[in-house]
Image (cartoon, rainbow, N blue to C red):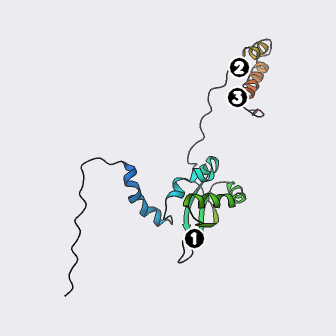
Amino acid sequence: MAKKPIPEAPAERSRRARPVAELVPSIGGQAFKRFGFTQSAVVERWEEIVGTQYARHSRPEALSFPRGRKDGGTLKVAVTGALAPMLAHVEPQLIERVNRVLGYAAVERLVLRHADFSPSRPPPPPGPPPELSAETRSTLRDIADPELRASLESLAQALVGSKGPPIVR
């Protein structure tokens, strides 16, 4: 007769509140595995991997590997609008960055899929317009036409607030 193994006693529960960050890896791990992410690092650090502009319009969907291997995988990425050709041009850099985050050559190629989803985060609102110098204000004061003065003031603020050519509105 085979002996039945003695079940281990459940871990003691404490009455202290635990941070959510402590619970997420165990709970979220199953969901990530279901969608092909054995490690959640790619999803969590997507903005760091691709940059803010690309991260707003793309997201990783799944990471699949050839049977019996844990390297040479395919990363499936959902992309909005016309961003797919732009990501295709930087594919080698993205693969390198993903592999650097994972710590080994896990991804060998990307598969881009067009998708419709709202951008993850709206761009930050522009800050207050920069202050014009006293000299600039005095030269604008001499202009009689109010529309021309407003246009030139807008141009002067764009020049002061940027490092390159102004954005004409």
Foreground of the two, 51 or 144: 51
Alpha-carbon span between mark 1 and mark 2:
57 Å
Callout 2 environment at 10 Å: few (<14), some (14 to 19), or many (20+)? some
- Is 144 rendered above or below residue 161? above
Mark 3 or mark 1: name the one nearer the start of the chain. 1
Which quadrant of the rendered structure holds the C terminus?
top right
Residue flagged by tag 3: what amino acid is it?
A: Gly
What x and y, as percent, mark residue 51? Answer: 62, 49
Q: Secondary structure at mark 3?
A: helix
Mark 1 vs mark 2, foreground winner is: 1
Callout 3 environment at 10 Å: few (<14), some (14 to 19), or many (20+)? some
Residue flagged by tag 2: what amino acid is it?
A: Leu
**Residue on which the image places disc 3:** 161
Callout 1 environment at 10 Å: few (<14), some (14 to 19), or many (20+)? some
Measuring 20% from the left and 82% from the top, which residue is drawn there?
A: 3
Measuring 54% from the left and 75% from the top, which residue is drawn there?
A: 69
What x and y, as percent, mark residue 156? Answer: 75, 24
What x and y, as percent, mark residue 76? Answer: 59, 64
**Residue on which the image places disc 1:** 71
- Is 53 rendered above or below residue 95? above
Foreground of the two, 148 or 123: 123
Mark 1 or mark 2: name the one nearer the start of the chain. 1
Q: Secondary structure at mark 1?
A: loop
Mark 2 or mark 3: name the one nearer the start of the chain. 2
Foreground of the two, 122 or 60: 60
Q: Secondary structure at mark 2?
A: loop
Residue at the front extreme, as displayed: 103
Q: Residue 54: which disc?
A: none
Quadrant for residue 153, please give it: top right
**Residue on which the image places disc 2:** 132
Residue flagged by tag 1: what amino acid is it?
A: Asp
